[in-house]
Each structure stands twice: as structure tokens, then as C-alpha cells.
Image (cartoon, helix red, strand yellow):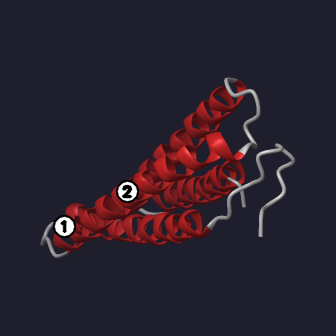
Amino acid sequence: MDIWQREEALARTKVAWGMASVVAGLGLVAATGTPWRRSFGLQTAGWGAVDLGIAAVGLRLQGRRMSLLPDPYAAQPQEPERRKLWRILMVNAVADVGYVALGMKMARDSRSRVSGAGVAVVVQGAFLLLHDSFHAVGCANDRHVTSQGSGKQEP
């Protein structure tokens, strides 16, 4: 998979998760009046909206970076992009562990609003940890493309 395909796969997954989170979160808020569920729903919808924004900005920036390169599928520009994405994903994975830890602390709070939000943070952080780790490993294992710009992978 070349770096541009990897970034598009990241964005597709983020959009799907973001949309599902917004719909499920707002649906839960609309369907219930309990503070725990409303807090869980609002937190879930908020994270989903942020994921949608990140995916949109990421795709826009990718298009801009590609347009500045004479051949974005050549090996020379792909390798620095791959390394940069890998570093970003690894930093994100560390942050995701922090989100899960913070969410677990919040989930143990006696106030239902805080504990509901905390469980939502754990769910979102756990998904992002799996998502970012999966793509970081994939990014590290991605083959380099040929310098002819054909987009074919070298053996």
C-alpha cells in the first residue's frame, strides 16, 4: 500500500467511526433522560464530530501535498511521508493510552454525568488506540513504490 492509500484508508475508517459515533451519541441523548446515558451520548457525539473534522482536514492536506510533488507516487517523496505518518500515529497511540486511563478514572467517579462521559472516553480511546496502532504497524510494513511513478510496489 502506498502512503496515499494508507492515508485514505485512515480517513475512511475515521469517517465511518465518526459518523457512527455522532449518530449513536445523539440518538442516545434523544432517547433517554438519565444523566449517565446523556453524558455518554454527548461525549460520544463530540468525539465523533472531532474525528470527522480530523478526517476532512487530513484528506484536504493530503491533496495539497500531492499537488506540490512532480510525481507523488515516486519512491523519493513517499518514504519521508511514510515516516512522518508513522511518527504521528505512534504519538497518537501514546495519547490514546492516556485517553483510556483518564476515561477509566472518570468512569469510577460517583457523579453519573462524569462516569457516563468517562465510559465514552474509554470506548473512544480504545478504538483510536486499535486504529492508530493498526495503521502504524501497516505503515511500518508498507512496501516502497517504484521510482517510475507507476504506483506498483517493489518486491
Identify the residue shown where x is 55% and y is 61%.
24
Q: Quadrant of the N terminus?
A: bottom right
Left or right for 2, reference 33: right
User: Which corner quadrant of the image does residue 112 belong to?
Assistant: bottom left
Q: Position of residue 55 (x, y in %)?
A: 58, 44
Identify the residue shown where x is 63% and y is 40%.
77
Identify the residue shown where x is 15% and y is 66%.
111
Q: Position of residue 143 (x, y in %)?
A: 68, 64
* Mark 1 surroundings within 10 Å by alpha-carbon count, few (fewer than 14), some (14 through 19), many (20 or more): many
Q: Is residue 103 visible?
A: yes
Farthest-out residue, left: 110
Do the residues bearing badges 2 and 1 touch, measured as CB atoms within 8 Å?
no
Q: What numbered label is drawn on residue 35?
A: none
Q: Quadrant of the C terminus?
A: bottom right
- Vertical comparison of 51 with 66: above or below: below
* Mark 2 surroundings within 10 Å by alpha-carbon count, few (fewer than 14), some (14 through 19), many (20 or more): some
User: SS for tag 1?
Assistant: helix
- Vertical comparison of 150 with 62: above or below: below
Q: Is residue 38 visible?
A: no
- Residue under pointer 1: 106
Q: Position of residue 22 (x, y in %)?
A: 54, 52
Precedes in sequence: disc 2 or disc 1: 2
Q: CA distance from mark 2 to mark 1?
A: 21 Å
Q: Relative to the observer, which residue lies in front, 146 or 110?
A: 146
Residue type pointed to by label 2 = Asn
- Residue under pointer 2: 92
Q: Relative to the observer, which residue lies in front, 136 or 38?
A: 136
